[in-house]
Image (cartoon, grey):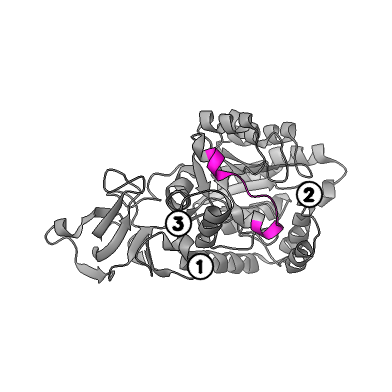
Amino acid sequence: MSLLVDNVGALVTNDPELGEGPLGVIEDAAIVFGVDGTVAWAGPRSAIPEGAAAERFDADGRAVIPGFVDSHAHLVFAGDRAREFAARMAGERYEAGGIRTTVAATRAASEAELDANTARLVAEARRSGTTTIECKSGYGLTVADEARSLAVAGRHTDEVTYLGAHVVAPEYAGDPAGYVALVTGEMLDACAPQARWIDVFCEAGAFDGDQARAILKAGIARGLTPRVHANQLGHGPGVQLAAELGAASADHVTHTTDDDVDALAQSGTVATLLPGAEFSTRAHYPDARRLLDAGVTVALAADCNPGTSYTTSIPFCIALAVREMGMTPDEAVWAATAGGARALRRDDVGRLAPGARADAVLLDAPSHLHLAYRPGVHLTAAVWHGGNPQ
């Protein structure tokens, strides 16, 4: 059934042709969700088409924004690493090896347990306004466990990423080349049909530039599009590799040179920033201002995982990006909606313009500015996905 969301104080469309500024904000607005689950019309209340919808919802002067697009999440896992977090807060340094703790727990869990935990996290993300979410494997690291992780992910999202190259599996600790051969061979054969994307953790303690290139090229040959965990823990080849291979996104992008920033700007690869990880590891935040000023497209994502960013809250990440990374509130909201869509190469989400999917969030606030202005406060009053209330 079609729905008119009326009496919207401020509507963020992310379409400058519809409203003011890059966010395309329309004051005193309304929006119509069609029977097909897309936006049928958006504009000022004074111009609502006659007979626009079968039902009416009164927004009572509150803001409506596009649903958040979380383009980086690790949701298929078992167990938690709360003790590891506490140790970091006591001064221990984060290194990539902690992933193996989750690998052991995930392998020991049943598929039903993994599915239930993934469903719980997706529902949690939806409650805070996330309507599109990417989900990676990467905590199985065997052919069977990676394949079942992708099967679980695929029940909850179309944006499924093969991350067999998260770290070297413990069985291959003394033979990383053998593990790369597995990831690019038998494991890829089992996983490629279930995924859209391929990712690699290109970092000291995980995979070097040559290994990462081989893994991503093997995925590309199987029809997968690359994404890269790049330059999180220190400077490395990940950003340049992402640009070289035309990756949809380089994620983390915490430690960069001028050449890295130029490569991102020239290639069109999205820089997906994950401030929850820096918050949870007490690490240096990426310089979003530097990236934006250079013309790089920036996305914000939650990086939900049990070790280094156990949050599904995009509003929390928006507040961090504004406070710690040099972004304006407008830039952060765009990055968490339209920017995430760019990182997933989608044009049907992340905006509220005619033809886009009717994914929207009603804020218990008069403006999207309150997402950064009121950190830690749950402002999600209602969520629609494909025009349906959640």
Residue at the image point whose x is 77% and y is 56% from the top: 98
| Residue 309 figure quarter | bottom right
Q: Where does the image place residue 362, in percent across and percent down from the top left? A: 36, 65
Is 8 left, or right, of 161 in this rendering?
Answer: left
Q: Residues within 10 Å of mark 2 (few under 14, many from 20)?
A: many
Rendered view: 381 above or below 161:
below
C-alpha span from label 2 to label 3: 33 Å
Tell me whether the residue at label 2 lies in contact with that at label 1, contact meaning CB atoms closer than 8 angstroms. Answer: no
Q: Amino acid at mark 2?
A: Ala
Residue at the image point whose x is 72% and y is 46% from the top: 233
Residue at the image point whose x is 41% and y is 59% from the top: 369
Q: SS at mark 1? A: helix
Q: Where does the image place residue 42, in percent across and percent down from the top left? A: 24, 54
- The first of marks 2 and 3 along the sequence is 3
Is 190 left, or right, of 8 in this rendering?
Answer: right
According to the picture, the residue beneath numbered tag 3 turns out to be 68
According to the picture, the residue beneath numbered tag 2 turns out to be 169
C-alpha span from label 1 to label 3: 13 Å
Residue 233 tag number = none
Q: Where does the image place residue 7, in percent across and percent down from the top left? A: 24, 66
- The first of marks 1 and 3 along the sequence is 3
According to the picture, the residue beneath numbered tag 1 turns out to be 123
Q: Is residue 387 visible?
A: yes
Q: Amino acid at mark 1?
A: Ala
Q: Quadrant of the C terminus?
A: bottom left
Residue range (magenta): 279-291
